[in-house]
């Protein structure tokens, strides 16, 4: 354990939290204790939190009150999860059309606005409150610790860069924040042999305890390391994010970096939903913060059966997410994890297939770039990126009504800034984008 990391966790972070009137440290300590409780005790805690958020939603959110009344669920008469499952699901279109009616009336002056990256092809604007922010951070801290990744330790992030050029004040703030927390970041939206060599050099200089990155970006870097016999600092672990990791990808990353891979599953709406521990037998759910359901044709899926993932946020009192269709498919594990934690397991998550895009100059852009980009444009309802030839790109867009020309012009500029001028773009306005034959939605498709 490093002296700086120990001091950061014991002194700097608690002091900062106290000055900002935050409670993440307290929630993290509680979560560390909770994980060793029995599954039955954890589910009892979850049910109490569910009853609280439903009572609040009924009293303060007109849209949710109508939903609950139609399902016959009034405050006090929800006793079991079977009662809860009578409630219809909600989706992204519901939020777009009824967002103002979803917001709790007593939280209007305490909302934080956020945007999703559209990893399912549908960007979204939503709100949350400070309590929810603290809970999701506590869940992330706990989950990352299973990979040996603790606050104050050196962490290297291979992921998305800000869209456009942030103001100098924001750049300075980010630099100071990363220095204190001992973070280093590297932009994965433009990988080629030169930038991958630069990334490896930065890793070797920084000597991180943990590397966190987009799955595809880590695969590309690992492949480059192996093919070119590069020497890279051996970190303690790698955490994959943004999409699932299959056995082939896991083997490639572990072979390239000579360190174990820990899979995470999260989203902009909820941050860490589930995370692997060191037994790698599935992903432990963030049970105290989120209620996760897997359903097939509106019925609960059996363990081992693939179904649609529904998420209920137990602490976003400002804009409740209740039985929210996140857009992914998943499978609940039939067994308990041998690690001894009572947190239930997701066996795996399906979906989020994000193909990389390539340019004539040899640049490789992970598919995560496009969800990262599209969250900036509120005129976009849905999108899909298709590369059929190396020199061209086709982008299907379902747009809201109104003049979108200014946003589309800025969108083209940002894409060219990352991909370069040698690739031509065709922006196609379409009324809808169909699912694949398997019923999934592909955000980026490469046919090269």
Image (cartoon, rainbow, N blue to C red):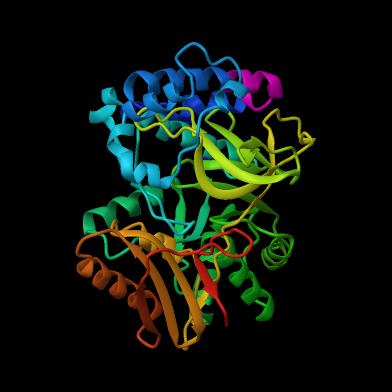
Choose between 411 and 325: the one closer to the eye. 325
In this rendering, position of residue 166 left or right of residue 37: left
Residue at the image point whose x is 55% and y is 70% from the top: 355
Choose between 171 and 416: the one closer to the eye. 416
- The answer, for residue 4, to whether it is visible in the render is no
Choose between 239 and 416: the one closer to the eye. 416
How far from the left and from the top, in percent, is residue 437?
A: 62, 65
Residue at the image point whose x is 19% and y is 64% from the top: 403
Q: Which residues are magenta?
A: 34-46
Q: Is residue 288 above or below residue 347?
A: above
The residue most toward the top is 76
The quadrant of the image that shows the C terminus is bottom right
Residue at the image point whose x is 70% and y is 55% from the top: 260
Count of marks placed on residues = 0
In this rendering, position of residue 219 left or right of residue 136: right
Q: Is residue 104 above or below residue 142?
A: above
Q: Is residue 320 above or below residue 196?
A: above
In this rendering, position of residue 279 left or right of residue 11: right
Residue at the image point whose x is 31% and y is 39% from the top: 99
How far from the left and from the top, in percent, is residue 354?
A: 54, 65
Q: Secondary structure of the magenta portion, mostly?
A: helix
The residue most toward the front is 70
The quadrant of the image that shows the N terminus is top right
Q: Is residue 106 above or below residue 360?
A: above
How far from the left and from the top, in percent, is residue 144?
A: 58, 43
């Amino acid at each position: 354990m490093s002296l700086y990391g120990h001091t950061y966790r014991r002194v700097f972070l608690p002091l900062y939290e106290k000055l900002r009137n935050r409670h993440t440290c307290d929630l993290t300590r509680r979560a560390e204790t909770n994980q060793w409780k029995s599954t039955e005790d954890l589910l009892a805690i979850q049910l109490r939190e569910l009853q609280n958020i439903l009572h609040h939603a009924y009293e303060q959110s007109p849209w949710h009150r109508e939903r609950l009344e139609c399902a016959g669920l009034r405050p006090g008469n929800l006793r079991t999860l079977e009662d809860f499952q009578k409630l219809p699901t909600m989706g992204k279109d519901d939020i777009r059309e009824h967002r103002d009616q979803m917001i709790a009336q007593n939280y209007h002056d305490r909302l934080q606005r956020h945007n999703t990256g559209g990893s399912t092809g549908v960007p979204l604007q939503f709100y949350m409150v400070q309590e929810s922010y603290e809970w999701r951070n506590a869940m992330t801290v706990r989950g990352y610790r299973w990979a040996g990744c603790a606050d104050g330790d050196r962490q290297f992030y291979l992921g998305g860069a800000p869209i456009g050029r942030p103001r100098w004040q924001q750049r300075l703030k980010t630099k100071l924040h990363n220095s204190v927390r001992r973070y280093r970041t590297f932009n994965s939206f433009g990988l080629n042999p030169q930038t991958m060599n630069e990334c490896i050099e930065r890793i070797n200089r920084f000597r991180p305890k943990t590397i966190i990155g987009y799955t595809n970006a880590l695969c590309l870097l690992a492949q480059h390391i192996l093919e070119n016999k590069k020497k890279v600092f051996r970190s303690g672990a790698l955490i994959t994010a943004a999409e699932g990791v299959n056995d082939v990808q896991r083997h490639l990353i572990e072979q390239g970096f000579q360190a174990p891979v820990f899979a995470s599953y999260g989203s902009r709406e909820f941050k860490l939903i589930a995370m692997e521990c060191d037994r790698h037998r599935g992903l432990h759910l963030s049970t105290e913060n989120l209620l996760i359901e897997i359903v097939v044709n509106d019925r609960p899926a059996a363990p081992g059966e693939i179904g649609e993932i529904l998420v209920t946020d137990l602490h976003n009192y400002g804009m409740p997410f209740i039985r929210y269709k996140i857009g992914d498919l998943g499978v609940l594990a039939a067994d308990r994890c041998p690690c001894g934690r009572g947190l239930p397991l997701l066996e795996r998550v399906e979906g989020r297939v994000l193909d990389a895009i390539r340019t004539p100059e040899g640049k490789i852009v992970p598919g995560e770039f496009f969800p990262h980009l599209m969250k900036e444009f509120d005129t976009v309802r849905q999108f899909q990126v298709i590369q059929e030839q190396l020199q061209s790109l086709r982008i299907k867009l379902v747009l809201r009504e109104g003049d979108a020309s200014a946003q589309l012009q800025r969108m083209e500029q940002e894409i060219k800034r990352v991909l370069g001028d040698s690739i031509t773009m065709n922006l196609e306005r379409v009324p809808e984008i169909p699912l694949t034959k398997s019923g999934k939605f592909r955000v980026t498709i490469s046919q090269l």
